[in-house]
Amino acid sequence: MTQILFRLPLIFICVIGVSIITTCKTPEPDIKEDEKIAMFVSPVAITRPAPSVPVTTAPPVERQQISTPIPITQEKQHIHTKVPRITQTSFPPIPQGGNLNVASPIWFSDLDPHKEASPSFAAWGPGLAYSRILKFQTGENIKLPSLSTECDLCEEWHMEDPSTFVFQIQGDTKWQPSPETKEQKVTAYDVEFSLNRQKQDISVNSHIIHMIKSIKAESNERLKVILTHPDADLFIALANGKTKIISKDVFSTRSANLSNGPIIGSSPWRAEYRPDDETVILTKWDYQKITPYINSLKVMHIPDHQARKSAYMVKLIDIYQIEIEDLEEFSESQILNHPDPGVGLGIAFNTQTHPFDDISLRKAVMLAINPTVIIEQGWNSKAFFSLGYPVASQMSLTNPDKLRKYFNIPDSARNILSKEHPKDQVNITITSSDFGEEYLESLEIISSQLKSVGINTNFRMLDRRQYSLEAWKKGDYTMLVGPVLPQNSLNGYLLSTMHSSGPWNTTHGSDLELDQLIEAQVIEYDREIRDDLIQDIETHILEKGYRFMPATRKSTWSWGEDVGGFFPNFSGNEYGHWEKMWIKP
């Protein structure tokens, strides 16, 4: 009897797992790498000034400490109780007025928030005019990376059961004035309409809220959300900058087509799109509110990074994302660095193809690789080690002590090779693509490190589109070195990329133990228990040698001396930070 009771949770998890894999629909990987690299950013640390890091040849040491951010303690949050909407009861003496100018390297092609996938629309353009049910926390005291949420349109929420959540919608949020808005205030019926529309196949952002089964407005201020299965990433999905709330009245007057506007939202920003010069002007429209502090935010499309740098140097724009090769030019500037989980250099092994069907060879390659050298020489120290998936807090970052047994022990790599392949010359083919100088430099470093233990390498270089189709979609590689398929959430990554039944499991690992760990953390709402499960997953992936990310990018930003309050959190296409910035008098 005891054994039967013990097995019941596992049976439940396995049944849930089948449902999860079926409903977690990840879109085809037709993703421009420029968009992924340019926009997925989330700063954490400010240094003033930032010293330049010279690229030098590392001394021939056998072991070095692996670079990774230092975790900090974070207060536990409980989701089984009502969480009130965070409101600001007193305001600091911050200057009002002024205009902020910024530039985006990528652009958008549609004004319909449910048909446009570009982060430039969601977080750097017309999308700022729209509100969401939840939003990610931003501000000086937020330690990033962070996916901690707070209410945007909601007042509070509570959980009726693991698959049913009730949100209380604010009753005083106004739609921006327009002839189309029959209802002057946002209601739960607008939220119901918006989420149902986003769930449809016409929406390129439907996968973000894949876990939602149904949405029902029970009154103007009460909304019930029912899930297909319990999913701890529901809140991340609702806070994503692409999960926008539109007016059902505006939509009803536009014959189901918002591709050319109007842009009518309920945020503090009113958006004006000027297609002729590819510019978006966002202006504060409700001056009864304190925020935004500035009067307007102007976003320009400047695709060339040299042109953006020049615009910043002559003060045409106020904020600039620094390219790695330009870091020395900004060594005397105020600098903001931040980890960017999921963006950077990933390494994956095809476990069904010789020679990496042999776990001992996968371990030998890992032992030969020194991530610290890759980070310092290939990425100018603007990177850290991770396993490539989105993380919700600094507590979820990989502990450097865990890594020492898996990497940078070349003598152990040589011992494995001499024991397992005493007469064979080990040759491997690395599939990659030219995604920039840091990626190409990393390839050379990895090849040199493998050669030092007796592994010969050759490269199969694809163009970026071929890389997306051949590597991400088909899994046509022996060893893959390059960017990983971006995901919006931890569950999105683990279910699609690491689960045995995942559509993008290109390592072809079939691992029941890992599947059970993944399925258990999907439905675990207790943060501490889920963190423990994630740590177990991380250890399992390293032990099996499936994939890892030796260099996860830290994006670097500089801003003008007259700009105040620059504490952004770009995780999950967040944009609330723009409201909290100001121009110094």
Image (cartoon, rainbow, N blue to C red):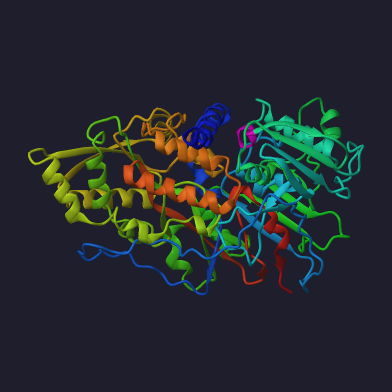
200 in relation to 341, above or below: above
Total labels: the figure holds 0
Q: Residue furthest front?
A: 1
* Residue 312, horizontal then vertical, whole percent: 58, 62
Q: Is residue 208 magenta?
A: yes
- The majority secondary structure of the magenta stretch comes to helix
Nearest the viewer among 470 and 550 is 550
Drawn side of residue 364 relative to residue 487, left or right: left
Q: Which segment did they paint magenta?
A: 206-211
386 in relation to 45, above or below: above
354 in relation to 398, above or below: above
Residue 10 visible (yes or no): yes
* Residue 142, horizontal then vertical, whole percent: 62, 63
Residue 353 lies in what quarter of the image?
top left
Nearest the viewer among 294 and 374 is 374
* Residue 324, horizontal then vertical, whole percent: 43, 58
Drawn side of residue 466 relative to residue 583, left or right: left
Residue found 40% across the figure and 45% down from its top: 435
Drawn side of residue 403 relative to residue 93, left or right: left
Residue found 22% across the figure and 42% down from its top: 360
Quarter of the rendering occupied by the C terminus:
bottom right
Q: Residue furthest left?
A: 423
Residue 247 visible (yes or no): no
Residue 23 lies in what quarter of the image?
top right
Drawn side of residue 362 relative to residue 269, left or right: left
